[in-house]
Image (cartoon, rainbow, N blue to C red):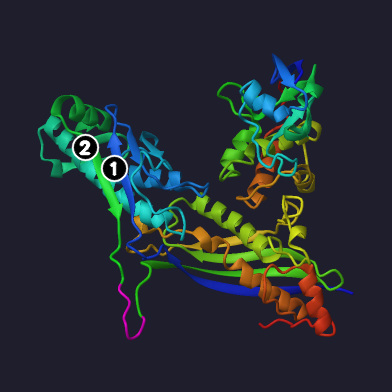
Amino acid sequence: MAIHRGRGFASINYPIGMNLGGDPSQALVHSNPGGKFMVALSSIDLGQGMKSVTRQIAAETLGVPVEDVYVDTADSDTGPHCMGSFASRGTHRVGNAVIQAAQEARSVMLEAAAEELEVDPADLVTDGKGNIHVKGAPSKSITTAEACGAAQFKQGRTVSGRGIFLIPLSEVDADTGEMTPVSCFAHAALIVDVDVDDETGEIDVIQMNSAYELGRALNPRLVEQQLVGGAWMGMSHAAWETTEPYYPERSHGPLDFNTYLMPGPGDIAPHNIAILERPAPDGPFGGKGPGEMCANPVLPAMVNAVFNAVGVRIDELPITPEKVLRGIRANGGAQPQGRRG
Amino acid sequence: MAKKPVQFRLNGSEKAVFVDEGQNLLDVLRRGVGDLTPKYGCGQGTCGTCTVLIDGEPHLSCLTLAETIDGRQVSTTAGLARGSELHPLQAAFMDGFAAQCGYCTPGMLMAASALLERNPDPSREDIVEAISGNICRCTGYEPIINAILAAAKAGGARRYG
């Protein structure tokens, strides 16, 4: 009886969003008279960072400090329509809608500033710190708050903008079946090392190493956090979670957290992540998004690692100790596959 | 159903409530005295997000009979910060991105604060043990463990309440 170390690899080519009916998301941006901006969305922040990222995108586009932007999400009564937070689409789809809305609001803000300064709006720039000034003449300036106040109390303008991201429906070629279901792809490769106990069938995840290409990482700390957490979800799906464990009776299945298994804080492994930035031409500031891809490569990589360790090819998830032991028995014992390279 | 008077200290202030027989502490905290920081997760003591400290020890408030806290000290996440000054654990959780959806965070903070009170210099294994009754579905635990280590380094053992 022994513990066998195995290494598994998986790579992934992952579509951002989908194109079944245009995949639209909308954003509305307006300022209050004090120059603070509100971004209204129905998109949902599940903790992945939608609010932070759309706030950064809006601030960058408007040319105002990030502290001056508020994001209101997830109320479909007050926010404009969004398809939702799924298909790894949030940053890309909603981000593009926010850019369009923020550009429109910015142009009104600059028109208001131009009227106050008696200059051409095309000559105005923002410094990102709350000031608007004439290009090359920083002393000829007005604050964003003053411009927004003048618009709403003197000039009769709403400093607001509307944005929507929509891609044309891709028709399916009748002869070849060819279509363009998505607008861009993100990519990843992941290596996982596991120990398999050939006496108990239990798996220990020893370490993960991964590389992710997801356009520009708009908020690198959030990207890393999403990848670390997502890999845990992948581990959990690979070797722990199931509503249908192999039991004779359905009623013996898991009904609560005592019996529905997940890896705990003692089961996790070090995960080294390399983030490769290759900005997407149609992404908001080049961003695509980590999304579902955080979890996906972990599953096939772990299956491959178990095969590498003991020669058992698992073809139904999760990789439970029982399946590993049955496989070892069917093979007449553990058959470590050795390493290439 | 008969009501029982219960007096206890919540984060240092005196509270007096009438509780139903069999009513749990989580319900008294949330609905009785309006402290919404302990969360209702599973309601059966398996997820840990309702964790509060009773006389400094972590307890699952969903499984604690409210009448048993008469005369005792209850601490919740609402009592961690001093005004606008965050508790070292809260600051470390923020700096270390140790929350995503945030639903497990109050329970994690209370389990961690009890740990740091009794062991100001915990090892990684001590931390894993201390939060092993708390489920997190988003972060993969690693940022939480790292945040607690960082808070300990920053002098996270700060008595309060």
Q: Residues at badges 1 and 2 in contact (C-beta under 8 Å)?
A: yes
Q: Earlier in the sequence, mark 1 or mark 2?
A: 1
The residue wearing badge 1 is A62
Q: Is residue A150 positioned above or below A44 on the image?
A: above
The spot of residue A315 in percent (x, y) is: 67, 77
Front residue of this view, candidates A297 and A244: A244
Left-right relation of B158 to A187: right
**Residue situated furthest front in the rendering:** B1
> What is the quadrant of the C terminus of chain A in the image?
bottom right
Q: Type of residue at label 1?
A: Leu
Left-right relation of B38 to A97: right
Residue plotted at (79% across, 83% down): A335
Left-right relation of A293 to A240: left
**Where is residue B129, by image quadrant?**
top right
> What is the quadrant of the N terminus of chain A in the image?
bottom right
Q: On what subunit does the disc labeled 2 rest?
A: A
Q: Which residues are magenta?
A: A171-177
Q: On what subunit does the disc labeled 1 rest?
A: A
The spot of residue A220 in percent (x, y) is: 49, 52
Residue plotted at (41% across, 65% down): A278
The spot of residue B120 in percent (x, y) is: 77, 34
Give the crowd class for mark 2: few <14, some 14-19, many >=20 residues within 10 Å: many
Q: Type of residue at label 2?
A: Met
Front residue of this view, candidates B145 and B35: B35
Left-right relation of B19 to A155: right
Give residue A338's mark.
none
User: Visible in this render: residue A202?
Assistant: yes
